[in-house]
Amino acid sequence: MDKRLIAGVLVFGSLWGFSEVIIGTGLQNANLPYGAIMTGFFALSFLVLSRMIFRQPGMQLGMGLVAGGLRVFNPLVGCHLCSAIAIMAEAAIFEVIWYKMSPDFSDLKTITMQTSMGVAAAYLVYVGGYITTQILTPIVGGVGFYLENLIIFMPRILASGLLPAILGAAVLPTILQVRKLDFTIKDRFYYPTALGLTILCWASVIGFSVIGS
Amino acid sequence: MGKQKIIPVLAMTLLIIGIISALYVSATQINKDTITIIGQEYTVNDLYILGGEKTIETAYGEITGASLENIIKSIGVSCTLCNKYTIKGADGYPKTIEWDILKTGVLTKENRVCFPDTPKALWVRDVVEIEVN
């Protein structure tokens, strides 16, 4: 596998996990709808940005594993099982949604397509992740999954996708503007930068967990 | 139909589903100060008297509340092990659990059910009913 791609997975996955743990916790403490904001803004930004730069299907799934790993570790305090499962599920769902899209994003030329794709991707990723956690968390947590509970709760889950969808409508066209900026990093800077950012993210999360425990 | 049509239609459909669901959730939201257990209404204070205070150790620190084990036994459920228990929140969030787990939990003054050994996602806030199945 391409070393540059692996470094990309580590950096973007770590940035995603870092934002989930550090910023997500801050949003949660501020009583804001952190799950919707994390998916509609941060997750969608990292997923689309990485897809745009590397044009490599499958990469986002790897990012989800890295970010979910960072979240489940949050190392040292608690087990944020739900969030970790949701992150990994979101990455997998993003891959499915984006599977048929052209690698150069030529499908998303008009603002209508960009906002529509932002709405659809954010809504489906968030709701899909939510449903997955509702199924897997009770199973992994050892209390058993009951389908009738999920069915009763479905309207709430479907309603909760509205905010990420609205955020997605604004985020995707904004991220696509980055395409117009032409910046490249030479290999001799790329790997140290990637490694540095990854270490910084993991060290911050570990430090945050140690302070919080 | 190409992507140029499918994606906007899909986006519109998802937004409509979200809006209708939000309206439904808002219309069916339960607002009450009591908790229904086997057809009887109890306040949190009533349940504290029935259950007695108990402190549990969770991944998020110690939590004190009324013992769910004592509450269920006090209200006269004869065979606690034979039943499953569905705890419902005001937002419609239901969680069905076995006695082995229920008996470890507490109901807090803030009307939240917490358990020591389960993920936080399985805790239910703003409890309105404990159904004995």
Image (cartoon, rainbow, N blue to C red):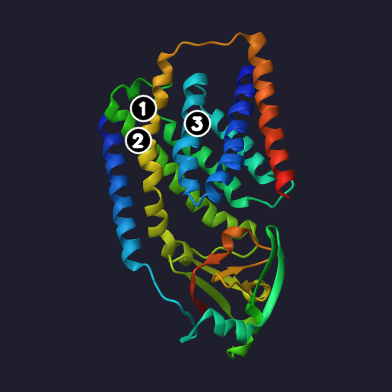
Question: Compared with residue A52, is residue A202 higher up or lower down, i.e. above or below?
Answer: below
Residue B126, percent across and down?
Answer: 49, 69
Kind of residue at badge 2 = Ala
Task: Residue A58: give its label.
Answer: none
Question: Compared with residue A12, is residue B78 higher up or lower down, i.e. above or below?
Answer: below
**Distance of mark 3 from mark 1, alpha carbons?**
14 Å
Q: Chain of mark 3?
A: A
Task: Determine the secondary structure under disc 2.
Answer: helix
Q: Chain of mark 2?
A: A
Residue B105, percent across and down?
Answer: 65, 72
**Distance of mark 3 from mark 2, alpha carbons?**
15 Å
At label 2, counting other C-alpha atoms closer than 10 Å, the crowd grade (few under 14, some 14-19, many 20 or more) is many
Picture quadrant of residue A144: bottom right
**Residue pictured at 34% horizontal, 24% vertical:** A108
Residue under pointer 3:
A47
Picture quadrant of residue A206: top right
Q: Earlier in the sequence, mark 3 or mark 1?
A: 3
Q: Chain of mark 1?
A: A
Tags 2 and 1 touching, CB below 8 Å: yes
Residue A142, percent across and down?
Answer: 65, 62
In depth, the one of B100 and A187 nearer the eye is A187
Which label sits in the foreground, 3 or 1? 1
Question: Compared with residue A181, is residue B2 higher up or lower down, i.e. above or below?
Answer: below
**Distance of mark 2 from mark 1, alpha carbons?**
7 Å
**Residue pictured at 55% horizontal, 43% vertical:** A24
Residue under pointer 2:
A169
Residue under pointer 1:
A173
Whether callout 3 and callout 2 share a subunit is answered yes
Kind of residue at badge 1 = Pro
Task: Determine the secondary structure under disc 1.
Answer: helix
Task: Determine the secondary structure under disc 3.
Answer: helix
